[in-house]
């Protein structure tokens, strides 16, 4: 391979090295009424950790969690109307998580409110090296990639302990 | 007074400034007061302190920003995990 | 009697002629700065600053004698400030100074080369002794008057004088310059 080809390959590969799969969801931002796009690499997490209050139980918990994490990448969209994103959008992410290193550990499907959620774990050398979450609802879509040796217990503990301003959860919608 | 002191008296006799000095001073005194900014070491030190303080403040600002982003990221994650955990315990279809 | 006591209040209504004060004291102020800084251009700048400051504070001064006292004090202060800003203590590489010519015994003082050497040596003294030497030998003030201007104890003034003279003598003797000029 020529030097130029290697450099071109590296240009594509290196940005991916932080995030463990591509989200391919940028096109949804224009349709969203609200969008969150967070790319927090290791240095950013370590920098932020310095500003977390160790005396605050929630922040202390977060601080402990992120010290071992190499990155957190999130795309979250909320839409005014249903159908703003397509199943193909979700599949473009899900298909990447069918790679051998990924395993789906939980999948929730709620016919009542039309919400679905899946948790994937990436393993390397029998150790967790990443977590992926895909959560869909009629009017919102969330994809999360946590990179690194994630403490799953600590991660699971997050829910129910945060004193952060409430993120509006998708209210259950009745299928008509 | 010994010889050295006498020599010093001569050596340190008053000397006149350049011609027109007095007129220049009077003219300057009549002119509107202008601040002649001469670089002063304390100004440089103050500027450096301001920059350092500004850098510190900016770092603090960036740190608070980073912290809020991290908390938001984990909040979003926590909400989704909470939903998953709730439904995993409940009657919704669960695939494992 | 101190200088201020000598000056004595002459009434707040006494008006001081700024132009007249400049004419009368320009050499004094300039020379304090010049002997302190050993730089004519810098000395003129400092001197101008001193007089502009005088112009600002004219109403605070009570007499011409008070003005003279004030000018001496401010001239020294501004010269000191300038010297610190320039962060330069004139280095006197005596090797670069031409040898003073022999002065026959009994001849009047005033060898120009010796004078130049002495000016450079004085300008190379530490700031406080330098100011003392200038006020002593340029202005012919006694230690108590110098102490008042510099806000320094009289004992300190005398100590500076003694040490500075001893230092100058030593430096001159090393160069072979003594009471009768070149001692060969």
Image (cartoon, coloured by chain):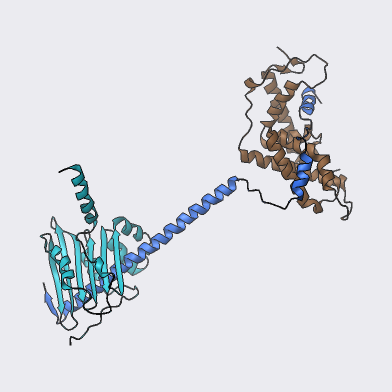
Chain colours: A cyan, B blue, C brown
Q: Which residue is located at x 72 percent, y 13 percent?
A: C183
User: Could you tell me which quadrant the N terminus of chain C lies in?
Assistant: top right
User: Quarter-wise, where is residue A137 in the image?
Assistant: bottom left
Q: State the residue in front, B6 or C152.
A: B6
Instruction: Specify whether residue A85 is in view.
Output: yes
The vertical placement of A102 against C54, above or below, is: below
User: With A103 as the anchor, is C21 left or right in this view?
Assistant: right
Name above or below for residue A18 compared with residue C43. Answer: below
Closer to us: A174 or A147:
A174
* Percent of width and height locating residue A164: 34, 73
Residue appearing at x 59%, y 48% in the figure: B42
Q: Is residue C152 visible?
A: no
Q: Looking at the rendering, in which quadrant would you find the C terminus of chain C?
A: top right
Image quadrant where residue B78 sits: bottom left
In percent of width and height, residue B24 lies at 76, 42
Left or right of residue C145, residue A83 in this image: left
- Which residue appears farthest toward the bottom when viewing the image? A176
Viewer-proximal residue among C154 and C42: C42
Residue visible at 14% across and 71% down in the picture: A106
Exactly how many numbered labels are in the figure? 0
Residue C5 x %, y %:
86, 46
State the image coordinates of residue A46 (x, y, percent, origin top left): 32, 57
Instruction: Give residue B21's quadrant in the image.
Output: top right
**Left-right relation of A20 to B66:** left
């Amino acid at each position: 391979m020529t030097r130029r080809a290697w450099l071109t390959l590296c240009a594509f590969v290196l940005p991916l090295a932080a995030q463990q799969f591509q989200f391919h969801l940028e096109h949804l931002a224009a349709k969203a009424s609200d969008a969150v796009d967070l790319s927090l690499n290791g240095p950013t997490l370590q920098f932020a950790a310095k500003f977390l209050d160790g005396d605050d139980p929630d922040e202390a918990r977060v601080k402990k969690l992120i010290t071992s994490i190499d990155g957190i990448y999130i795309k979250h969209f909320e839409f005014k109307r249903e159908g703003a994103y397509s199943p193909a959008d979700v599949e473009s992410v899900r298909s990447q998580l069918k790679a051998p290193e990924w395993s789906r550990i939980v999948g929730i499907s709620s016919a009542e409110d039309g919400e679905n959620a899946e948790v994937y774990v990436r393993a390397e050398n029998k150790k967790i090296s990443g977590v992926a979450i895909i959560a869909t609802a009629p009017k919102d879509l969330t994809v999360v990639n946590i990179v690194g040796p994630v403490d799953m217990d600590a991660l699971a503990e997050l829910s129910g302990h945060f004193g952060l301003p409430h993120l509006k959860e998708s209210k259950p919608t009745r299928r008509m | 007074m010994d010889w050295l002191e006498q020599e010093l008296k001569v050596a340190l006799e008053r000397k006149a400034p350049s011609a027109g000095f007095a007129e220049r001073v009077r003219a300057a005194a009549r002119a509107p007061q202008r601040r002649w900014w001469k670089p002063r070491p304390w100004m440089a030190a103050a500027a450096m302190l301001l920059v350092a303080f500004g850098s510190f403040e900016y770092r603090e600002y960036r740190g608070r920003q980073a912290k809020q982003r991290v908390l938001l990221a984990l909040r979003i994650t926590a909400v989704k995990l909470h939903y998953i955990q709730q439904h995993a315990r409940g009657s919704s279809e669960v695939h494992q | 009697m101190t200088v201020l006591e000598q000056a004595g209040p002459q009434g707040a209504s006494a008006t001081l002629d700024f132009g007249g004060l400049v004419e009368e004291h320009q050499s004094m102020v300039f020379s304090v700065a010049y002997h302190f800084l050993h730089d004519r251009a810098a000395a003129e700048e400092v001197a101008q600053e001193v007089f502009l400051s005088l112009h600002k504070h004219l109403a605070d001064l009570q007499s011409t004698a008070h003005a003279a006292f004030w000018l001496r004090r401010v001239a020294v202060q501004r010269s000191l400030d300038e010297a610190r800003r320039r962060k330069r203590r004139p280095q006197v590489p005596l090797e670069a100074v031409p040898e003073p010519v022999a002065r026959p015994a009994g001849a009047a003082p005033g060898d120009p080369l010796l004078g130049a050497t002495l000016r450079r040596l004085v300008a190379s003294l530490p700031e406080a002794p330098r100011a003392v030497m200038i006020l002593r030998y340029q202005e012919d003030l006694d230690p108590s008057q110098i102490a008042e201007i510099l806000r320094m104890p009289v004992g300190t003034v005398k100590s500076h004088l003694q040490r500075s003279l001893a230092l100058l003598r030593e430096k001159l003797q090393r160069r072979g310059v003594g009471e009768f000029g070149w001692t060969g």
